[in-house]
Image (cartoon, rainbow, N blue to C red):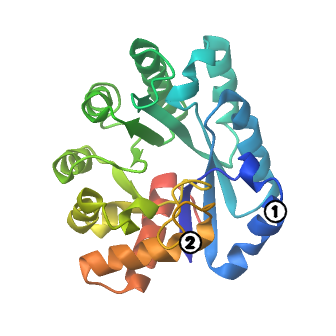
Amino acid sequence: MIFDTHAHYDDEQFDGDRDELLKSMPDLGVGTIVDVSATYESCEKVLALAGKYPHVYAAIGVHPDEVGELNEDKIQHMKELCCNKKVVAVGEIGLDYYWDNEPHEVQQKWFIRQLELAKEVNLPVIIHSREASQETFDIMKEHHAGSTGGVIHCYSGSKEMAAEYLKMGYYIGIGGVVTFKNARVMKEVAAAVPLERILIETDCPYLAPTPYRGKRNSSLFLPYVIEEIAKLKGIAPKTVEETTWENAMRMYKING
């Protein structure tokens, strides 16, 4: 079975067929999905989805593009939500200097505060980093390394930096980008990182793999990601599927 470690099924792009799609997943080979919040408002939405579908879990956190709306009262409410048994991570949190929706110092403040939240509730973190590789790494090293663990989602850094994250105990999240023809660095990373430290993810509805690039993504496209990783490593796709499933169950502390 396939474990999609990072999805956004609360997104409006799924409003027309969300229930039908999520109900069908186990029969189509997708055994577990973590639906990840991006805004403060979506924290309640992902938890509702996790409550409705046995194979769906939730992550509670606010994306760096949206952290301007945070305050300590909202953090405390998020902390309460994290006590729900279907919540398996704090995320997605981090830095995004590509869109620059929020000042860098504001992003950094709430990134650090949400790393603290993860430690308070003893949950792994899901890290978003775009155009901020070194800053993200430095904050992770200073404020979180050696605590709850987690994954660098949709990893886009070098294989050298990936090796440093591995030393700190983190997993590397790999999705549809690895199938793109021009994704040379991502292919190098996928080949270099030990399979035991890779998680597969969609980030759906975004980042659909080739041959669906530009279309709405879903967990049903993950076999393309699995096949590409298998090809890069010279191993069987079934090995990638089984090992990444075990990795995700271990990191998210899901028993089953």
Residue 88 in percent (x, y) is at 58, 47
Q: How many other residues sit within 10 Å of disc 2, few (<14), some (14-19) or many (≥20)?
A: some
- Total marks placed: 2
Check disc 1 and report the residue beneath it.
17
Q: Amino acid at mark 1?
A: Asp
User: Residue sitting at 70 percent across and 23 percent down?
Assistant: 77
Question: Which residue is at the front of the view, 211 or 255?
Answer: 211
Instruction: For the residues labelled 1 and 2, say whether their Cβ atoms are less than 8 Å apart.
Output: no
Residue 245 in percent (x, y) is at 48, 69
Residue 213 drawn above or below residue 133:
below
Q: Amino acid at mark 2?
A: Phe
Residue 194 drawn above or below residue 11:
below
Check disc 2 and report the residue beneath it.
221
Residue closest to the far left: 160
Residue 182 drawn above or below residue 132:
below
User: Residue sitting at 61 percent across and 36 percent down?
Assistant: 38
162 to the left or right of 5 = left
190 to the left or right of 152 = left
208 to the left or right of 136 = right
